[in-house]
Amino acid sequence: MKKPRLVLVGNGMAGVRTVEELLKLAPDLYDITVFGAEPHGNYNRILLSPVLSGEMKLPEIMLNDLDWYRDNGITLHAGKKVEKIDRIRRKVIATDGTEEAYDRLLLATGSTPFMPPIPGRDLPGVLAYRDIADTEAMIEAAQAHRHAVVIGGGLLGLEAANGLKLRGMDVTVVHLAGWLMERQLDQVSADMLQASLETRGLTFLLGKQTEAFVQGESGRVCAVRMKDGLEIPADLVVVAAGIRPNTTLAEAAGLHCSRGIVVNDTLQTFDPRIYAVGECVAHRGVAYGLVAPLFEQGKVAANHLANYGIARYGGSSVSTKLKVTGIDVFSAGNFTGNERTEEIVLHDRSSGVYKKLVIENERLIGAVLYGDTADSAWYFQLMRDGKDIRDIRDHLMFGQNHIGDVGHQGKSNAATLPDTFEVCGCNGVCKGTIVKAIKEKGLFSLDDVRKHTKASSSCGSCTGLVEQILASTVGGAYQAAESKTKPLCGCTEHTHAEVRRAIREQRLLSIAEAMHFMEWHTPDGCPTCRPALNYYIISTWPHEAKDDPQSRFINERAHANIQKDGTFSVVPRMWGGLTTPGELRRIADVAEKYAIPTVKVTGGQRIDLLGIKKADLPGVWADLGMPSGHAYGKSIRTVKTCVGSEHCRFGTQQSMSMGVDLEKMLYGMWAPHKVKLAVSGCPRNCAEAGIKDVGVIGVDSGWEIYVAGNGGIKTEVAQFLCKVKTREEAMEVTAAFLQLYREEGWYLERTVHYVQRVGLDHVKQAVVEDQEKRRALHARMLFALKDYEDPWRAAVEKPLVRREFEPIEV
Amino acid sequence: MTAALAKKITAAEWKTICALEDIPRLGSRVVKSRAGDIAVFRTADDQVFALHDKCPHKGGPLSQGIVHGRQVTCPLHGWKIGLEDGNAATPDIGCTKPFAVKVEGGQVLLAV
């Protein structure tokens, strides 16, 4: 059967990205043909500025070379401009006569530079700044000539001016408005930017209108004359006075255009066979000139071209970054404010830092950063998420590191780090490796960088820094993922919250049911979603839903921790960290009998036996005769205790027996992530309860309970939840808090991140203030955990379970 | 497994290793052989595949990974290995050896 034909007009970033997205969804759906007016493959137009300034070379900015088109079976007509669309016969015709018929047509004709009607604009030496040819012409002119004038002090004009200056020309920027980049910056930051560019040798003429370009004796432009009579020498004039959506082709074909090709939320034009994406488009009256929204449009258009028909484009919020090396400028949203807004401003002129945050109704709605843009991605995220900033208001100005969830490595400004700086300590990835991958592979998202470099793919503590590197490398093309709408994984569009809700409301009792109901894209999920679904289902429907061992990570399937050589480690449970001579003797015997190479005391007051072959595990467990310590699970791990008033001369409460009771109550508790507790018998807190998921500290008059601490990747001190008089109350509060976390937490979200997300007030309300709710949570926890069977004993006694551990000999 | 690969294997080389039911769906079993450990996987649709039980990255035991679609994810560092050809999914590069395996009359046969 013949495939339907898809023709793309416009071989730029938006169009080709749409095709890439389409190939991901439906690789063999169409015969694809691409027309491009420029004689190249697809390149990263944003990086033309570094090419002009000599910091990058042309091959470095190619996104898809000719091989890519061939490998994907795409016919590329490079250097052929489409001049006509015949909508009746459904074909496009290029200037050289080439014709291609289409079943679906995708227009991505981009934009054209706006050339004001200034006399002399056709003279040799007067250029716009848009594509590779313009860039090459400017580089060439810089070698032969001396005086350059840039008309327009916006983003593009300044990048051009900076590039020409670095190429050795004397550059004057003529700008109509009172300050530079007036659409992105306020006057203070613009003045700082101007001063900084002036020290680099650029000259500025502000509030000046150009009257004419003057022709010299050679025929080439020789000067620029202002309305006020001033004349400045110019051998090269670059006009960067803005861009206009390129709608010529669409208009000639009778498609409705109004400041762009008008499209609906599915990127469809008024002709249902024709889609349009990119700078040529007007969506809800807005034409975007930055790359991030274009990629969002591409995703949606691809979804519809692939006949999925479910994605919608609702417009984008945009941010701007200036790509001039050594000058950091960022702006986003409404940065001028109005009578309802307030501003937080930091201005340090001598160190060249200016930050203005605009706030309305306790939400960040705009920002201008100059000099220090390390936190731009974070501010932008706050704006897009519409997050309430009341609680962080007093240190909002000082950035995310002062709020603290990017890990200790996020502290330095990504752009200034040397290439040899180790960004990801887990995988040994340096900044240079990341930057190289971003440039060579054309990466734009955190997920892409993770896949290609492994940076931030293990513990995740360097995520913030990797995002900063990404942002500083690709500039405006970087768009942080929206955390509120981030899907659980690539197999679904649904977020963790939506998945949890569906499982609860639709009574979904198995992974297969859940995937079917929520229309998973993959037949049996992936290693990210299956464990999450399994946890959500068994925690929502205890004793009804069946656990699926194949959807658990090996550690939880084998009830032991896999080690780098494929052997396992075994940690028997010692309630509250207490053991007996009998247990120790058995542990010693087991270690000798199975030639266990390493015996170690853990941080959680247990004994770890390391280097056990998988086949030996059931034997080890049978001989130990102790229950599983769950050192391997997203589950209750350990309750660490100090000696307490049983022995200690300072102790005020019996912390050991409290720890044992807590651990026995919680035995077998699966959770979104691992859960660690500690109980101290007095405020000296020898059990280090201040960095545990739940820390209980005995005082003379009762127990203090702290929650959401963490001693791992980033140390987080636990927050005070409440104080109770009796141990029964302490047990109830602990169980209620953990049950709330079990019901509301997202898979792989530790208590610290859960509480940061929902707020401590929400937790207090449910666990401390509302007695009824607390009792109900406590009861649900006890119900979920009743009749829990020790998995080690099951593996010893049940042949079907033991099969997991038995190899087959041939 | 391709028919071409199967044809080259003589009847004597096929060894019955277990019943299909002895391998859990989306799970695996380890076969100890002279050629080393071989991981035998069973997919959701009861297809059976066999790979050398060693991830091309750092030698992790693939048999212990999560099986999804036609891939297994190594338990050590999350490389995704194709069950059919043993190739690592892009952008990772590497390959582990596939073995011929088939199901006949409910029994799993492996060629070693």
Image (cartoon, rainbow, N blue to C red):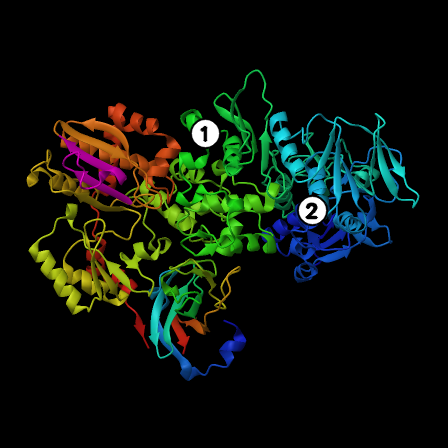
Q: Is residue A341 above or below residue A249?
A: above
Q: Which chain carries label 2?
A: A
- Quadrant for the C terminus of chain A in the image: bottom left
- Is residue A176 visible in the rendered structure shown here? yes
* Above or below: residue A712 compared with residue A705: below
Classify residue B30 by image quadrant: bottom left
Q: Distance between the residues labelled 2 and 1?
A: 37 Å
Decide which of tag 2 and tag 1 comes sooner along the chain. 2
Q: Where is residue A680 in the image (x, y as percent from the top left)?
A: 17, 38
**Front residue of A24 and A377:** A377
On the rendered structure, is A219 left or right of A192? right
Q: Which of marks 2 and 1 is in front?
A: 2
The N terminus of chain A lies in quadrant: bottom right
Q: Which residue is drawn at 25% across and 60% down?
A: A569
For residue A404, what is the image quadrant?
A: top left
> Amino acid under label 2?
Leu
Q: What stretch is highlighted in magenta?
A: A675-699
Image vertical order of residue A628 relative to residue A696, above or below: below
Q: Where residue A514 sits in the image (x, y, percent)?
A: 42, 45
Local crowd at mark 2 within 10 Å, few (<14), some, or many (≥20)?
some
Whether residue A714 is situated above or below residue A77 in the rendered picture: above
**Contact, mark 2 vs mark 1 (Cβ under 8 Å):** no
Residue flagged by tag 1: what amino acid is it?
Leu
| Residue A540 locus on image (x, y percent) | 33, 40
Q: Which residue in the protein does label 1 denote?
A: A396
Tag shown at residue A166: 2
**Residue lying at 43% horizontally and 24% vertically, measured from the top left:** A390
| Number of residue marks | 2
Q: Same chain for the residues at labels 2 and 1, yes or no?
A: yes
A138 vs A435, left or right, is: right
